[in-house]
Image (cartoon, rainbow, N blue to C red):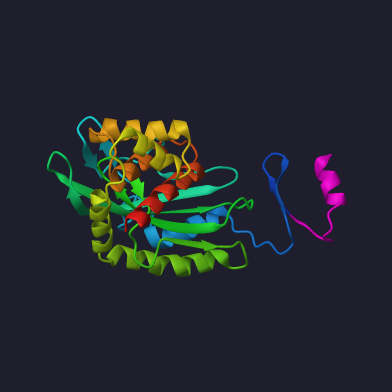
Amino acid sequence: MNLQHGLLNHRAEQVKTLEIENGRLELRAVTGPDYGRIFDSELVDAVQKIAGNGTGDTRWKVPGVLDWSTGIYNPHVDISSDTTTLYASDRDIFVFLVDDLNPIEAGRLPNGEPDLYFRGFYCWNSEVGARTLGIASFYLRAVCQNRNLWGVEDFEEITIRHSKYAASRFALEAEPALIQFADSSPMPFVNGIKTARQRIVARDDEYRQNFLRKRGFSKSETTKIIDTVLMEEGRPPESIFDFVQGITRVARDKPHQDVRLDMEGKAKKLLDFAA
């Protein structure tokens, strides 16, 4: 009844509908007549032109697995529903691949071992119009699997509105951006991490609380971020780097990718602030 009322009172003369026949006729989306729909399968086709099958036939692949008991990262694992980073639902799709066979060292861990990062990218789409088509780059921290959305020269995020030939435009824009990202010098990122480690912003609990609350984190999120750093780094957060790792670690537990990306975006702003 609500749909009928809305359509009868809609000012535009035409609307476009997406209907799927799957045992029964299902209405998936109602948009304007000029909406250029990009099906999720078109995004998959475009990504495969860049990353192959995601299992290692190119430098881009589904990430390996970190053994949390030993801290050892294994890039070669069988891909299953538990280890995959390829997600799809009835309303959107999310693909997350890394180049974990070519690690980048950015400092040292407390035990003296190298702090390794991997280049990576994720892309998304919604064929029912919930969001744009896009791709973004990041560095994945091996020791904790936190995504750091920062430090990339000339390429951080590309978004393309749903319009005619958008999927083809995505492939044309994303492929050269990823090639440049893969072959670019990691030094801006490495230097940024070094600066973030040295930038002390809080030395007591009151400053820690205020620092996070002023940046849009709730009271419960603030407590969780601080406790996470204390548990994983062995001390409370003091530097920009400490807070970023706490935020991205808490973001990992978010069940929905859009919520996780929003929190990781806040961490990115902190790294920008450090630079």
In the rendered image, the quadrant that contains the C terminus is: bottom left
**Which quadrant holds residue 13?**
bottom right
**Which quadrant holds residue 220?**
top left
Towards the viewer: 93 or 10? 10
**Residue at the spot 24% in from the left edge and 49% down from the top edge:** 197
Specify whether residue 9 is painted magenta. yes
Which residues, given as a range, are shown in magenta?
A: 1-16
Q: Taking 219 as reference, is 53 above or below it?
A: below
Instruction: Pinpoint residue 114: horizontal percent, then vertical percent.
Output: 16, 47
How many marks are shown on the rendered structure?
0
**Residue at the spot 58% in from the left edge and 51% down from the top edge:** 126
Q: Taking 70 as reference, is 77 above or below it?
A: below
Instruction: Pinpoint residue 133: horizontal percent, then vertical percent.
Output: 54, 58
Asked if residue 102 shows in the view, the reply is no
Asked if residue 235 shows in the view, the reply is yes
Instruction: Pinpoint residue 168: horizontal percent, then vertical percent.
Output: 52, 67
**Residue at the spot 51% in from the left edge and 61% down from the top edge:** 159
Towards the viewer: 92 or 231? 231
Q: Residue furthest left?
A: 112
Image side of residue 158 versus residue 194, left or right? right
Instruction: Pinpoint residue 11: horizontal percent, then vertical percent.
Output: 84, 58
Image side of residue 139 versus residue 72, left or right? right
Image side of residue 19 versus residue 205, left or right? right
In the rendered image, the quadrant that contains the N terminus is: top right
